[in-house]
Amino acid sequence: MATSELVQRIRELQDLLQRASVAYYALDAPFMEDGVYDRLYRELLDLEARHPDLVTPDSPTQRVGEKPVEKFESVRHRIPLFSLDNAFNGEELQDWEAKLLRVLGLNSDQNTLEYVCELKIDGSALALTYADGIFTRGVTRGDGQAGEEITQNVRTIRSVPLRLSAENPPPVLEIRGEVYLADAEFERINREREAAGDPPFANPRNCAAGTLRQLDSRIVADRKLSFFAYTVHFPEGWQGGDLPKTQWEALELLRSLGFAVNPNRKLCTSLAEVQAYFDEWDDRRRPLPYQTDGVVVKVNSFAVQQESGFTQKAPRWAIALKYPAEEMPTRILNIQASVGRTGAITPVAELEPVQLAGTTVSRASLHNADRLNALDVHIGDTAIVRKAGEIIPEIVSVLAELRLQGAERYHLPSHCPECETEVVRPAGEAITRCPNPVCPARVRGQIEHWASRNALDIEGLGQSLVEQLTRTGLVKSVADLYRLQVEDLVGLERMGQKSSRNLVEAIAKSKQQPWHRLLYGLGIPLVGTVNAKTLTQHFSDAAKLQQATPDGIAAIYGMGQEIGQAIATWMADPAHQELLSQLRELGLQLSAVESEASTLPAVFVGKTFVITGTLPGRSRPQMKEWIELRGGKVTGSVSQKTDYVVVGADAGSKLAKAEQLGVTTLDEAGVEELAAVLAR
Ligand code: IVH
C-alpha cells in the first residue's frame, strides 16, 4: 500500500472501531460482532506497529498503558465535585422540595418545577477532561476538592470515548459520571480471585473503586469497568453552538457525544410523578445487570439550578432518593455442603427465612473454606445477610456477641457428602473439590446445565427428573439422554406415556441447537454464553477447537490466557474427547451450519482475491467457491489490482509478492470475518 492509502486505512480503521464502540457502549445498538472487531483491531495494531508515527492517543489501540504508574498524582478539580443529600422516604422528599421552593421564593401554587429522575448507579464518581475533543485526563472524586489522576486506567474503560463525536468541540470540556462494574463481571472477578486464593471483593462498588486505583492499567483493562455519563461542563463563555439549557438536554447531548447515558430516566412535572417513578423502579431495577441504590432527582432547568445554588456539600437542586438497605440479620439454622457440576464444594447456610430486597431468603452462600474461617461461622449464629439485585444472597458477617454457649464451629467435610470420595484443595486455590468425575452430584449438575435455557434448552427436563434418571442409572452422561426410549421413562415418578413421549421429542429436538449453545452446555470452566459465541465464531467446528493451542485461544479478543488454558485442559481429557465423538455420532451440531447459498449477501462484489498456501478448514477450490458465492473474483496471481490475499500454511512467493505490494493479507478466519462485517 502506498503511504497515503496506508494513512487512510489507519484512519478508516480507527474511525470504524470508534463507531463500533460507541454503537456498542453508548447506543446499545452494536453493529459488529466481537470477532470482527477483534480482527479489524488486530489489523490496526499491525499497521500501527509498522508505522508508529501514525499512532494517535485517541486510537482505539491506545487504551492499555505499557507499564504501571508509580503512584497517582493528586489534582484539584476545576469545579468541585459535590455530593448529594439523601432522602429515605416521601416525607423527606417533600421537605426537600419545600426548602427548595423557599430558597427560590416560590409558593407551592407557583410551583411549575420540572424534575429529571435518573437511576442512581452504585459506583464511583469520575471527572473526565476532553481537550479539543480528545480525552486527556480522568480524576477520581477524592474529597470533592481534589482527586487522584487515573487517566491511564480510565482509558481502558470502553464506554469512555477517547475522541468525542463532535464537529466543533470546545477547547476543554468536563464530563462527569459514574464508573461501575456490571454484576456478571463482578462475579467473574470474584470467582477468579477465589480460584487464585485471593479474598473476594464485598460488592461491585468496592471492586470498581479498588480497580480504579490499581497502578497497573493492564489489570484494570482485564476487569471490564463501565461508565454512565450524567453531567457536562462547558467552559465559561463558550459560544461555539447551542448549549444545553436543561439536564434533559444535557443527557441527550452526552449521548450524541458518544457517551453511554443510562436509558432509564424520566422528566417529571410533580413530586407525585417522581415518587411513582421511584416506586416503579424498586422492582424494575432488580433485573438490571448492574447495581442501583436509588433515584437521583434533579431540577431540570439550569437557570433554576443556578438560582438555587449549593449548601456546604451538596446542590440544593438535587437529591438522592434512596432505596432501603438490603441487609438483614437472621439466624443460621444449619450449614450444608453442596457439590456443583465442577465438583466445587460450596458451604450453603440454611437461614431462618427473612424478607430482603423484595424476596424471602432462606439460603445463602458461604463461598468456601477461607470465607468460613474469616467469618468464623458457628451453627446457630446470627448473621447479616445481603441480597443485592440478582446476586445470590450471601452472608457478610456474623454477630459473634450473640453467639450461644456451646455453639459449634462449622468446617467443610473431609469427604464428598455425595460419593464419599476424599475432597481435595490444590495449593493456592480457594476451592475445595470432589475429584470423582462420576460423582452423582457432579453428573446431575452437568445434565441440568446441559438442559438449561441458555444451553440445549430441553423442555421438561428439570431437577427431579434428572435426579431420577441418574439414580436409576439410565443416564450417566449427557450423551445418554439421546439414547433414551419412551419405555425407559414410563413408570418414573410422574411420567406417563404422554410426558415420556414429549420428553424424548424435546431431547431429539435439541439436536438442532447450534454449536455455540452446545459448547456452552459442555460446562467448560470459564466458558459462559458470551465466550461460547466468540469461540464458535473463530472455531467453526469442535475439531478445530480441539486442535487449538492455549495461546491461539488466548489471542482472540476477549479471551485471555486463563480461558485458553481451561479449554485446552478440558479438551485434553480422554473422557471429554469420547463425549464429543459420541455427541457427533448421535447427530448433534458440533459445527456451525453455513447459510443457504441463495441467501448469501454479495459482500465481495468488485473485490479481487488470491488464495495461497494450505488453509485449515477448506481446500483452495472450496475457498474459491466460497468467495465467488459472495460475489468476489478469485485470480491466480497477485498484482496491484488484488484487494486481498488469503494466506494458509506454507505460503510462498504469492505471500512475498503481497507483502512487497502492500496488499492486505487475511487468514481463513479473517475472510469469514470480513464477509460478516461487510454484510452489515
Ligand atoms: S449527580 C452535583 N447523578 O451518587 C451532582 N450522581 O450520593 C452530583 N451517582 O457522588 C452527582 N448516579 O457518584 C448524579 N445519575 C446520577 C448518579 C449519581 C450515581 C452518585 C455520584 C454521587 C453520589 C451521591
Image (cartoon, rainbow, N blue to C red):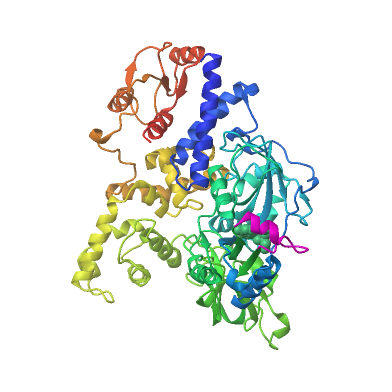
Query: Can you tell which quarter of the image residue 386 is in?
Result: bottom right
**Is residue 444 positioned above or below 400 on the image?**
above
The magenta region covers 301-317
Residue 123 shows in this picture:
no
Relative depth, front residue between 64 and 560: 64
Place of residue 653 in the rendered image (x, y in percent of width and height, measured from the top left): 45, 12
- Residue 48 against residue 356 in the figure, above or below: above
Instruction: Please tell me which residue is depicted at 47% across the width and 21% down the height of the picture.
Output: 664
The percent position of residue 536, horizontal first and vertical second, equals 41, 42
What percent of the width, then of the height, locates residue 185?
A: 56, 54
55 up-or-down from 409: above or below: above
The residue located at (41%, 40%) in the rendering is 537
> In this orientation, does residue 177 appear?
yes
Q: Is residue 72 magenta?
A: no
Q: Is residue 161 left or right of residue 664?
A: right
Horizontally, residue 323 falls left or right of residue 458, namely right
Quadrant location, the C terminus = top left
The extreme left residue here reads: 497
**Residue shown at the point (44%, 18%) measured from the top left:** 651
The verdict on residue 308 being magenta is: yes
Residue 292: percent from the left, percent from the top? 58, 63
Q: Which residue is at the far bottom?
A: 405
Q: Height in image: 497 above or below 407? A: above
